[in-house]
């Protein structure tokens, strides 16, 4: 019998939603087991780093890597799996763009650690902080060292394919699994290296069924606590919707349910900087030529960084704010 190709999946700086999305493919997960030898998937099986280190280079056919690179352990495993894998996929928003953990790039790493151990809900009167190494009777214990900024996977290693989403939609994952299996069976070919898979090539607006007319916004407002037209474009109603800059592939799930798009599928095809495209889109629909009124309307967006770079700060042209950059260059 011919040995099955090897499959791996790793969870770096992320929430674990990508693992759940894979399991949500239901019986399709059995196709993975039927066609692959799952050799490394820490969240689902007992596996050791030394086992991966002992594998031949390139012996893993497919690795789905989810999560950003926040500490030196993430970086080490990213480089290890790149070395051992023929195909490395940046799987999910965190690996692709940095996602929510990437917003920590607005602050220096030391400030992040200090805040984590000195909040109102934390009882730490002597201000004890974690150390990267400590001596105990059994030997020296090491814990991962936080890096100055969170990086996307392709800022650390070469990536073959990108699969966006927070998390990727389970039906998209299932479609990619089918494609890979067909490739193994000689019935299909892989897309060109660097391609985005499991997503669309347009914007969420193109998938959205809400009616779009002339956008003339007099004020931006929160979606809660006010009547909204169930059929009209949310942005035209003053709701900051990120659909104009966000890649399609989710079937406009949020706008269809009456909630604005927040951008979890990342930049649409051809968008160099997600935040810059959104700022341009929002500015173009403001119905005023009065600078003071325009400023007042823009002030209706309470959290500009979170609005424009919620998922994409680490993968944007900015990548980080000044405090984190200073530490990175030090």
Image: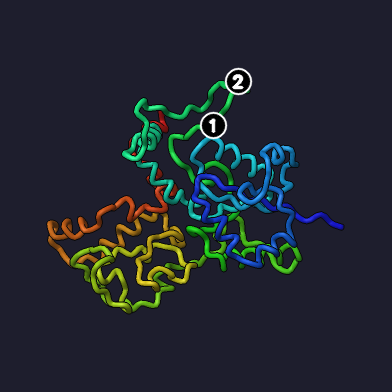
Looking at the image, is mark 1 or mark 2 nearer the viewer? 2
Quarter of the image where one finds residue 129: top left
Of 259 and 311, which appears nearest the observer?
A: 259
Residue 171 image point, x, y percent: 57, 68
**Above or below 143: residue 297:** below
Q: Quadrant of the N terminus?
A: bottom right
Q: Quadrant of the C terminus?
A: top left
**Above or below 76: residue 24:** below
Total marks placed: 2
Quarter of the image where one finds residue 197: bottom right
* Residue under numbered circle 2: 137
As helix, strand or loop, the secondary structure at mark 1 comes to loop
Mark 2 Cα within 10 Å, few/some/many (few <14, many 20+)? few
Residue 105 image point, x, y percent: 39, 41
Q: Residue furthest right?
A: 1
Residue 53 image point, x, y percent: 70, 38
Horizontal side, residue 246 vs residue 199: left or right: left
In the rendered image, is residue 324 in sight?
Answer: no
**Residue at screen point 46% across, 48% down:** 98
**Above or below 147: residue 24:** below
* Residue under numbered circle 1: 143
Quarter of the image where one finds residue 177: bottom right
Residue 56 image point, x, y percent: 75, 41
Which numbered disc flags the more N-terminal residue, 1 or 2?
2
**Residue at screen point 72% across, 46% down:** 58
Can you tell which mark lies on residue 163?
none
């Amino acid at each position: 019998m011919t040995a099955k190709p090897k499959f791996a999946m790793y969870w770096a700086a992320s929430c674990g939603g990508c693992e759940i999305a894979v399991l949500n493919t239901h019986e399709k997960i059995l196709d993975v087991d039927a066609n692959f030898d799952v050799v490394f998937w820490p969240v689902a099986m007992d596996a050791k780093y030394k086992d991966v280190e002992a594998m031949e280079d390139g012996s893993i056919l497919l690795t789905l890597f989810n999560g950003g690179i926040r500490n030196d352990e993430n970086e080490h495993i990213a480089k290890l799996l790149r070395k051992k894998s023929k195909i490395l996929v940046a799987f999910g928003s965190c690996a692709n763009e940095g996602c929510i953990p990437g917003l920590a790039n607005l602050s220096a790493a030391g400030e992040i650690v200090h805040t984590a151990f000195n909040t109102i809900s934390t009882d730490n009167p002597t201000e004890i902080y974690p150390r990267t190494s400590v001596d105990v009777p059994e030997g020296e214990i090491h814990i991962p060292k936080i890096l100055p900024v969170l990086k996307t996977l392709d800022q650390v290693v070469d990536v073959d394919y990108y699969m966006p989403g927070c998390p990727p939609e389970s039906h998209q994952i299932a479609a990619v699994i089918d494609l890979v299996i067909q490739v193994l069976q000689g019935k299909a070919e892989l897309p060109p290296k660097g391609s985005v898979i499991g997503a669309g090539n347009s914007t969420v607006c193109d998938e959205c069924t809400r009616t779009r007319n002339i956008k003339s916004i007099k004020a931006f407002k929160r979606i809660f606590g006010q009547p909204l037209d169930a059929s009209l474009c949310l942005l035209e109603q003053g709701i900051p919707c990120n659909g104009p800059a966000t890649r399609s592939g989710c079937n406009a799930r949020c706008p269809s349910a009456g909630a604005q798009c927040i951008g979890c599928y990342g930049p649409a095809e051809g968008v160099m900087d997600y935040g810059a495209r959104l700022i341009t889109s929002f500015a173009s629909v403001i119905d005023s030529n009065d600078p003071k009124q325009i400023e007042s309307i823009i002030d209706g967006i309470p959290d500009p960084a979170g609005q424009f770079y919620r998922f994409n700060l680490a993968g944007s042209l900015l990548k980080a704010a000044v405090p984190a950059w200073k530490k990175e260059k030090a």
